[in-house]
């Protein structure tokens, strides 16, 4: 069990002061003064990412402006043995950008140039600091957009999306980051420039692009990304369906997919979530429903009309108590604004919330929601549920008071139980937020020691000295022994017949 991590080093000890002095001397040869931060008041804003319960202050923060500067920073830190944590916008929710107290934060915030929009090839080449939504804004002139749309898309950057393999409400139909990136240019810890993928239909050699995407900054530092663009649909409508039971709503999701319908988006919220959101954005949600389901269809006018009709039929047959269809683009966007603001709306209910990210087979959604209801009683904490229902990516938000250490411990145990339930039901501990520090213990439950050793072997192939974002993502055998739990896959599962993700 991890306790909340605060920034303990108000004053550096002698060894840290010397380490910082050597680091600053080396980086002074690489960066202009305005690109290097080391005073505590300047480095404190980098002490955490969106998982604010865990905080550490780094020795320094580098904000390079060119690829050459990134290369030289990595070479200098490699020579000094200083660990590096790459950082995007800091919107991540798993502690992937949590600093190392004896290390450097390498921020790519100044890499915000859109290098090229190619409307003929339908691609955009951008630097890693470009915001997700800015790609679509730049491509809109050509009737194109970038499909993956995390709820934080107005702030999160494409480099961070690559690191975490981010998703969004429209990824059921259009895919995650890994399905929409063609090429990544990056620099290894030793300062070697490498490229993954290609602008051509195939790339020479081993296909390592999908290995790199989602590697959480442990393999290399991204300096350029080429993404696919897709045509903006002619029309889009949302069906909002109400259910008097969360399990019935969960089963309706499976029924839609079983009917051969792949909506552009398929999202669900339970009653506590819709009540919090409605007070926050006034989206027009049914506050009497135990759960609501948002199902979007896009395409030509004829395609949308036909799919909306089919979806409505399935929802009625699945027990929907009320169905409402968006009548304008403004209303459609309002429906989605509620879902996309679910996380900040939770802040109105509790001083703190803990957002989980497990993924399960669609048919198990109702089962997991019922289990979470029982866990609320067990841990004496409230939990509201919002999730990408179409691909089974669950985002339970556990509400607690971070100033109460006992509540924090109960929230952490609650979250671990949810993730272990996801594994038991045939799923996985993360769908799009990454492992970081938040879920590193849960990796012990999902993967065997031999599997984790294989993960470490891949990391060593990219970063032999282990200086890029160390102690994230992959737990050591010692950590798993301390955690005291074995993986529960294979014959140990209560339901070994369920297919694995």
Image: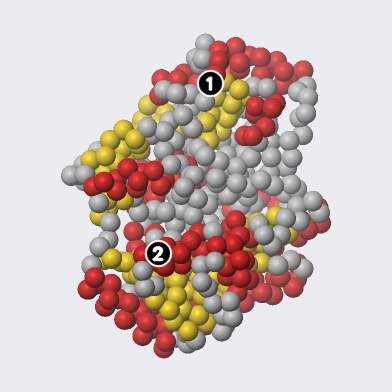
Q: Identify the residue position indicated by label 2 in the image.
A: 330
Residue 77 percent location from the top left of the image: 55, 21
Mark earlier in primary sequence (1, 2): 1
Residue 311 percent location from the top left of the image: 36, 79
Above or below, 248 relative to 7: below
Q: Which mark is residue 35?
A: 1
Dots 1, 2 in contact, CB < 8 A: no
Q: Is 78 positioned to the left or the right of 175 in the image?
A: right
Q: Is 112 positioned to the left or the right of 383 in the image?
A: left
Residue 211 seen from this side = no
Within 10 angstroms of label 1, few (less than 14), some, or many (20 or more) residues?
Answer: some
Residue 44 seen from this side = yes
Residue at point 49% right, 55% down?
A: 151
How much space separates mark 1 and mark 2, taking CA atoms? 42 Å
Residue 210 percent location from the top left of the image: 37, 47
> 446 or 21: nearer the eye?
21
Q: Nearer the viewer, mark 1 or mark 2?
A: 2
Q: How is the image coloured?
A: secondary structure
Residue at point 43% right, 42% down?
A: 131
Total numbered labels: 2
> 349 or 227: nearer the eye?
349
Above or below, 319 relative to 114: below
Residue at point 74% right, 73% down?
A: 377
Q: Secondary structure at mark 2?
A: helix
Q: Secondary structure at mark 1?
A: helix
Residue 450 percent location from the top left of the image: 54, 50
């Amino acid at each position: 069990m991890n306790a909340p991590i605060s920034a303990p080093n108000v004053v550096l000890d002698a060894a840290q002061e010397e380490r910082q002095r050597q680091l600053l001397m080396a980086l002074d040869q690489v960066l202009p003064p305005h690109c290097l931060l080391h005073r505590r008041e300047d480095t404190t804003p980098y002490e955490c990412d969106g998982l604010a319960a865990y905080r550490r202050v780094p020795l320094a923060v580098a904000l390079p402006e060119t690829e050459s500067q990134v290369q030289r920073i990595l070479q200098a830190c490699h020579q000094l043995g200083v660990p590096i944590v790459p950082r995007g916008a800091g919107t991540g929710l798993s502690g992937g950008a949590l600093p190392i107290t004896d290390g450097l934060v390498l921020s790519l915030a100044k890499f915000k140039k859109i290098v090229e929009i190619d409307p003929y090839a339908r691609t955009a080449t951008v630097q890693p600091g470009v915001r997700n939504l800015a790609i679509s804004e730049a491509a809109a002139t050509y009737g194109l957009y970038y499909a993956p749309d995390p709820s934080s898309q107005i702030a999160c950057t494409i480099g961070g999306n690559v690191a975490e393999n981010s998703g969004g409400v429209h990824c059921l139909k259009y895919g995650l980051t890994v399905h929409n990136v063609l090429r990544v240019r990056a620099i290894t810890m030793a300062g070697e420039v490498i490229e993954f993928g290609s602008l051509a239909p195939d790339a020479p050699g081993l296909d390592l692009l999908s290995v790199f995407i989602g590697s959480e900054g442990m393999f290399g530092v991204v300096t350029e990304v080429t993404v696919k663009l897709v045509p903006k649909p002619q029309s889009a409508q949302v069906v909002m369906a109400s259910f008097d039971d969360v399990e019935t709503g969960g089963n309706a999701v499976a029924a839609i997919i079983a009917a051969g319908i792949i909506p552009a988006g398929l999202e669900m919220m339970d009653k506590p979530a819709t009540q919090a959101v409605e007070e926050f954005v006034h989206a027009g949600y049914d506050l009497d429903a135990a759960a609501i389901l948002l199902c979007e269809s896009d395409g030509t006018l004829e395609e949308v009309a036909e799919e909306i009709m089919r979806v409505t039929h399935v929802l009625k047959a699945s027990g929907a108590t009320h169905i409402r269809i968006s009548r304008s683009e403004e209303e459609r966007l309002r429906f989605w604004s509620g879902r996309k603001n679910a996380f900040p709306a939770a802040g109105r209910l509790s001083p703190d919330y803990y957002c989980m990210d497990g993924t399960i087979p669609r048919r198990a959604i109702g089962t997991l929601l019922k289990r979470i209801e029982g866990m609320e009683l067990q841990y004496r904490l409230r939990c509201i549920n919002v999730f990408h229902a179409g691909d089974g990516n669950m985002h339970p938000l556990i509400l607690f008071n971070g100033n109460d250490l006992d509540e924090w411990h109960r929230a952490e145990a609650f979250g671990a139980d949810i993730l272990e339930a996801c594994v038991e039901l045939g799923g996985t501990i993360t769908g799009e937020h990454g492992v970081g520090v938040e879920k590193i213990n849960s990796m012990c439950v999902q993967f065997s020691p031999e599997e984790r050793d294989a993960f470490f072997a891949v990391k060593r192939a990219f970063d032999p000295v282990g200086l890029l974002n160390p102690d994230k993502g992959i737990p050591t055998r010692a950590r798993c022994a301390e955690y005291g739990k074995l993986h529960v896959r294979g014959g140990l599962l209560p339901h070994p017949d369920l297919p694995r993700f």
